[in-house]
Image: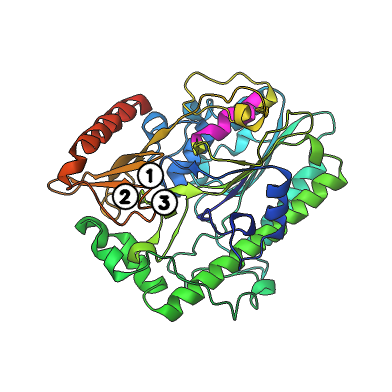
Amino acid sequence: MILADDARFDEFGYAGNKIIQTPNIDKLAARGVVFNNAYVTTAICVVSRASIFTGQHARAHGIWNFSDPVGHERWQRTYPHLLRASGYYTGMIGKFGIGRKPEHLPSDDFDFWRSRPGNLSYFDKSSPEHLTKRIGDQALEFLSTAPANKPWCLNIGFKAPHAQDKAPREFPPDARDEELYKDAAIAPPPTATDEAFKKLPQSVQRSEGRKRWLVRFATDEMALETTRDIYRLVTGMDREVGRILDELEKRGMLENTLIIFTSDNGFALGDRGMSDKWYMYEEGVRVPLVIVPPRGAAKSASKRIDDMTLNIDFAPTMLDYAGVKIPEKMQGVSLRPLLEKKKRGKTPAWRTEFFYEHRTLPKMIPPSEGVRSGKWKYIRWTSETPVTEELFDLEADPNELNNLAGNPTMAETLQKMRERCETLKAQAGGSL
């Protein structure tokens, strides 16, 4: 399980980005299956990672804040615990992302643990070595220690390309990558306009996303340098992915390993005059997803799949391939039917919508909830008085700039999306 941090869905060569250099992740995509419509159910590190481990919406697993420990009872329902209980040798490297104290971490429930609480730092005072390189080294160490007579599961939590928040240079790359993209003219996102910003709800305009935009994207030069550094971090991560794949091949493990590459959420590169994730717009909730099934699995009819997938699907997918029973409390579904559907076989029935919710740090990030279907996106900003609603026709308006919630001709559609939001929220479970 290779997890990037704050990587956008379009920051990779395989995704059509003509500037960024990601040759190893591109090879992974060529070898496996690319999911074009992969999303997270809450776009913030701690909640998304809890959802990945548990296969549950935030309402079900109950972890909303950075200080929330995963807890013994919750951890018993996670895929790393269930795999280890079934005989797997398990490892955790890099960013775990849940809990702020060492005692909050389930380090004793892994055979190989190389993680610490918090957001980690790209550089330690004691060494000039970049964190991304150190994580790559630790991944190779894990592979060298994995017993030959046991299956294994390695979880790699890269920090890249997440910011070193409030540092003089917030996205510091490996020294080897300093010269990359120095002359690259990276175009800003199409929604990086003052007009798009003014269309946001008032609470969003005043939120943390705008404050961080001011120090990262407020001028053309600032935006370009920020984006170049983010691209450098992604390329540095790609180099370590290449080292890991080479080591798997060298050890004869590559063909018999399920590989998942994804991110905990997306990131706004100045989109809508904002920075970071959190909000339900595509740049924040859509993530990269490449899966390489192990040898012997039936091959997918397609190398690119448009079916809607969620971060809560990874846990049941891994348990399914491992032959471990999937707990009933896991709300995600195994992606194996999509990965292995035959060309002439039956296309498996699949979700066509999902519920999104964000409740973390409500004084900094306006709480929101909504539904994303194939054609429609409905967003409800619950801290606004009265509640502000947004409705977008994604087919006609993929950049989500034309809010139809106040259009009388859309009243019936709006009401249907409100009702779907309530239904899906109830199915997500729990209460606040």
Q: From this view, report whether residue 265 is shown above or below residue 429.
A: below
Q: Amino acid at mark 3?
A: Glu
Q: Which residue is mark 1?
A: 65
Q: From this view, report whether residue 349 is shown above or below residue 217.
A: above
Give the mark, 3 or 2, whose residue is nearer the N terminus: 3
Look at the numbered disc 1 and give the secondary structure of its residue. loop
Q: Is residue 314 magenta?
A: yes
Give the mark, 2 or 1, whose residue is nearer the N terminus: 1
Q: Is residue 291 visible?
A: yes
Few, some or many residues within 10 Å of mark 3 (<14, 14–19, 20+): many
Q: Which residue is mark 3?
A: 282
Which-is-in-front pick, marks 3 and 2?
Answer: 3
Q: CA distance from mark 1 to mark 3?
A: 23 Å
Residue at left 31%, top 40%? 370
Q: Is residue 432 magenta?
A: no
Give the magenta part as a residue range: 312-320
Residue 149 on image: x %, y %: 84, 28
